[in-house]
Each structure stands twice: as structure tokens, then as C-alpha cells.
Amino acid sequence: MAKQIKVRFGQGDIVLTKSTKFVGVRKSEFDTRDLMAESQLDPEIKKVVHPNLGGFEIVTVNKQKSEKLDEKKVVMRALAEVETVTNVYHVPGSEKPLVPTGSIYIQFANGVSEETQKSILDSLYLALKERRNDTKVVAQCTPQSKNPVTCAIELGEKKEVKWAEPDMDSTVEHYAYANPTARLMGQMWHLQNAGRIPDNPNIRIKPGADAKVVEAWKILDGYGNPNIVVAVIDNGFDISHPDLNTKVVRPWDLWNGSPQLRAGDPTFTHGTPCAGVAIAPPTGGMVGSAPVARFMPISGTGFSIESTEAMFNYVIRNGADVVSCSWGTVENGFQLSSDKIAAISKAAREGRGGKGCVICYAAGNEGVDYLNFYAQHPDVICVGASTSEDEHADYSNMGAQLDVVAPSNGGYYPIVSARAYWDEGIPGEVGANKWYYGDGIDRGSRYQHFGGTSSATPLVAGICALVLSANPNLTAREVKEIIRMTADKIGSPSEYYNGRSVKYGFGRINAAKAVTEALRRAGKTTTSTPTTPTTTPTVTPSVPSQNPPQGTGLFRYGTNARIANKGFSVQAGSFNQWASVRSTAPGLETKFKQPALVHVAGSTPTTMMYRILLGQFNTLGDANRFLATLKAAGIAGFVRDLSGLT
């Protein structure tokens, strides 16, 4: 029997055993492959099972039956292109890999001086990575120190140390329910359910078993605020997808530390359909619940403290309003540590300039009576799944912390969303696209059936973006309160205690009621239905002025008359040279029958910026509808609130 090791982890202790088949490899920063005809490492690796856990590539090793894994690790460490080879661990009864990142989180006892703390770290050849307060530090293993698990155990045995936790990374479950479909708005029953699916006359679903998103758009008189940013943290983003490629802002890949997202790996495809459910535009192949919101893809999920802190610090620093996380774990013993809890709390309270990021987490698809540990966090919205019959989806986890359910698969019909171009589908299925469409109807290669709490969560995240569109002054806590209080009670009334059910939370989300409540709190009245602009102005193309407007601000193109910063417009271009404005603006006025405005910014000729805006609309809804016209004509643009221009 493998030796068992007990170490501090999360909210208590965990028992580990060293893996007998996996090791973690970190390659040298200097790529020695450039100097070799063939890598020395490649013959040693049998299979890469994960490209990045805790900064390590997790592999199985080529070895003879007589060889031991520890012997092979010695051989691999000796290779010039290898920086580190680390042990991989498991908890008893599980094959899920746990990989020490090399960081150790240490809580010293009160009164232990910094000098004594340094002496203890030095005795184990640990470097001080970060000091968090007088008694809490993060240490980093060095080439001279023992492995992080052993160091943490030895630290924990010292009277000066309250506890020491080795940071361990692991895989998290991505909560898609693997039942692959679709494309047209009429098939997106989760947004508006009329009781039938186009192309499937024999399928009957329950009318009204939807999230009331279309009704919410009518109340908003449009699709929401295009300045709202929805961050989706996941893996496998196809940002070339036609429903995503015009929406991306500030992407980041946590595994490679750059804005270049990993693509093409068939192991990772989950992020693409999750993003589609939240933010796909109104003019694409499908529609998200927040169709004009912007999309911040953050690639590289991880269980470690370091990765958790990195992803949530990123959303704070880079202006995410809503965060959607369709992943997590219910693995026994994998409760969140105090540092992970603090990282999520920080985003929920300090994001959005102190109003807090609205964070949505999937309840999980294991069909158990407890929730994804991340989703249990008190500052997030925990999302379960309901079906096209307005019933509890049997895979959706249950628990006392469940906040709301949202329509997903599990009934007679799944959800429609985007598909990554490299998604290979289920091996062994006949036909390149067949499995993407469970009803056998081929709707093209860029879409698929989707579901699970993975789909329910971004649906709710998009609705939260609509709520913030209605009232941007709401705090994250107030958005959560609104989502709870406006949900529709489904299922049996006897399943609710004090208004809450372990199966449904506070009920099935109702976007229309949530938006109405947000508007009420903002002191605004609602409109009944979205309308087209009441008049279509007749615009005579302006005579191009030879000179740009004098000063900065907003001007009518052609006359250079200053215009009041009121209403909304659609930005159609941005230029450094006035000549470019003169050659572009008249043609846009002629084609789209809207007056061209010019916003001038900058203080010197080298910093001057000229933005062409089309139209001046009284309502956000009218501006969004004109934006759709522009995009249908192949012109990328976005809505501007003119009151925010200076």
C-alpha cells in the first residue's frame, strides 16, 4: 500500500499518496530544443495528460517494468532542458492529480518576530515570496529545499507556526452536460419559450419554462449597456468564432501569462459555448442573454491558491463587471482555503470601483446533495439548472447555498450555443457534425447542443449584465439580492422553506422581473416594448470641412458646430488624421441616413484622435438597433453614451 501523507489543505488536513504513474515537468526557460536535432526529453515522456497544472506539464513516463518512477525522475532532472521534476499526489480513492506549485502559505503564531520567521525559512532553504501581514507569509521553494509537501509538514511541526499549507493545483470539473446543438433564435427556448422548437414539430416543451430574457430586452428597450464587461473564466475559447470575434476585450491566458489564448487543443473546448450563452450578439447565429455586452475571456482554470488569486485579481484590475465560472469541484476534502475565499471576496467587494464584481458559479453536475465548493462561497451567485419542462435537472447539484436555477438541458431539449472550430466531438460517432445535433438536424459546424450548470451559469451572468444595464449603481450584493427576490417559484411549494429550496434555490431566474426591480431602485419607469426610432431623419451628406473643429469635444461633421453631449450614438471609426475623417464620414451619412458626429480628443497634433459617430438617439434601445444595422452591413462599431464623452 502506498505511503499516506497528512498535510494542511483548505479548511483542514488532507491525506495524500504519491502518484505511481504521473510526474510534473517544468522545462527550462531557455529552450534547448533550438540546439538539438531532437529533444532529449521527448523519449522519456509517454503521454502528456495535462499541459499546465501549477506551472508543470503533467505526464506519464516511458519506463521498463523493472524501473521505478523515482529512478526515471532522476534521469529526467539531469536533462539540460528540464528545470524541475515534481511529485504528483492523489487523495485515496481518486485519480485526480494534485501538484505542488512550490509556494507554501504560512501562518506564524502571534508574537513571532520577522527575524525568527526568516530564520525558520532559511533553515528549510525557503525564500520569502510575499509578506501579507506581520504573521502571514508566502514562501517559495528553492533548488536547495525539500519538496513543498515535506517542507510544509516540517513547518507545521514547529511551535512558532500555527499552520503551513503547500499550494496545490488540480483539475477542476467543467460543468457542461455532454449532450451536444443549434443556431436560430427561434430554437433558443431558454430565452423565450413558446412551447415548440422550429425544425422539430414533434417536440413539445413547456411554454413559459424560460428565463424571460426577451421580455427583459423589451423592458430595457434594447439589449442592455454595451459598456458592461462579462468575464468568462474557463478553457478553450475560440475567439475567431463569428459570434465572439467582435466582442473580445483584454483577454488573458493564466497558463502562459499573456493575452494570446491557447487554441486548437481538443481537450479544451468548454469556454466557447459558455461565452456564447452569455454574450453572443443579436445578429449572429445565436443570441446570448446580454447580446451587446463585451467579452473578457480568461483562460487557464486551476485549483491552486495562486491561480485563484491571479484570476480574480485580473478581473478587478481590468474592469470586469460580471464574472461567469462554469467549473469547480465537489471532490472530498477539496474545500476552499481561507486565501481562496479571500480572493473571491475581494473581487466581489472591490471590483467595479468598489461596487463589487457580480460573480456567478455553477452548482455542479454530479447529481449530489451538496454543491461545488466554489459555489458555496457567500459572495457568489450559486446557479443550478432547470429543464424545458420547468423541472429540476436531475444532474444539477443541490444544497442550502443554492441561489437560483436557470433553464438548461435535462428535459426534452438542450441549449443552443457556439462551438470551437477544433472541437472534435465524441470519438466513434458517424458523421463530422452528427453528434453536435442530438435531433439529427445539421445546422452547421460552428454550433452545438450544450447544457448542464455550465450553460445555466453564463445565462445568469448575462442576465446580471442586463440588471447592471438597468441600474449601474447597484452593488454586487444588491444584484444578488435582486436575482433571488425576483425568481419564480417552480416545483412544489412544499419544497421551499423560508422561500428557499435545496433543489431550486429561490426559484427559476426571471430576467424581466430582475430588470424591472433594478429600474425601480434607480427611480426609472419601464417601457412596454422595444420600438424602432419614431423618425428616420433625412440626411444630406455634409460638405467636408477642410479643417478640423477647433478644440476638443463633440461636433457636427461638416459644420463643425459644437453639439451637446446628450443621448446615445454609434461609433463607426477612429482616426489620427482629419483627412481620413473627410474621406469616410460623407459616405456613411449617405448609406445609413444618419448625421455624422465627430468627437475630438487629444492635446497635441501627435496625440489627436478623431472618432466618427453616427446618429444621436434619445434611447439606448434605438442606438442598439442602429448598431445592429451597421453590423449587418459589415461595419464593426459600438454604442457610445454621449454624456460620458469629454
Image (cartoon, rainbow, N blue to C red):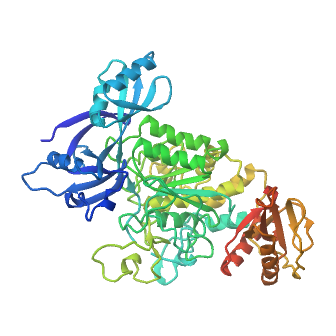
- Residue 191: horizontal and vertical position, in percent? 57, 68
Residue, far top: 111
Q: Position of residue 312 (x, y in %)?
A: 52, 46
Residue 511: x, y in percent? 62, 60
Name, please, the residue furthest toward the left: 66
**In the image, residue 260 above or below residue 353:** below
Q: Nearer the viewer, residue 499 or 562?
A: 562
Q: Is residue 284 above or below residue 501?
A: below
Lateral position of residue 563 relative to residue 311, left or right: right
Tell me the quadrant of the picture where the N terminus can be found. top left
Residue 330 lies, in percent from the top left, at 36, 48
Image quadrant assignment for residue 103:
top left
Q: Residue at x 51, y 70 (%)?
A: 206
Marks counted in the figure total 0
Q: Is residue 574 above or below residue 544?
A: above
Please state which of residues 183 and 353 is positioned toward the viewer in this rendering. 353
Residue located at (75% from left, 66% from top):
576
525 vs 133, left or right, is right
Q: Residue at x 70, y 52 (%)?
A: 518
Compared across the picture, whether 28 is left or right of 524 comes to left
Q: Is residue 299 visible?
A: yes
Where does the C terminus fall, quadrant-wise? bottom right
Q: Is residue 96 visible?
A: no
The part of the image, by quadrant, that contains residue 87 is top left
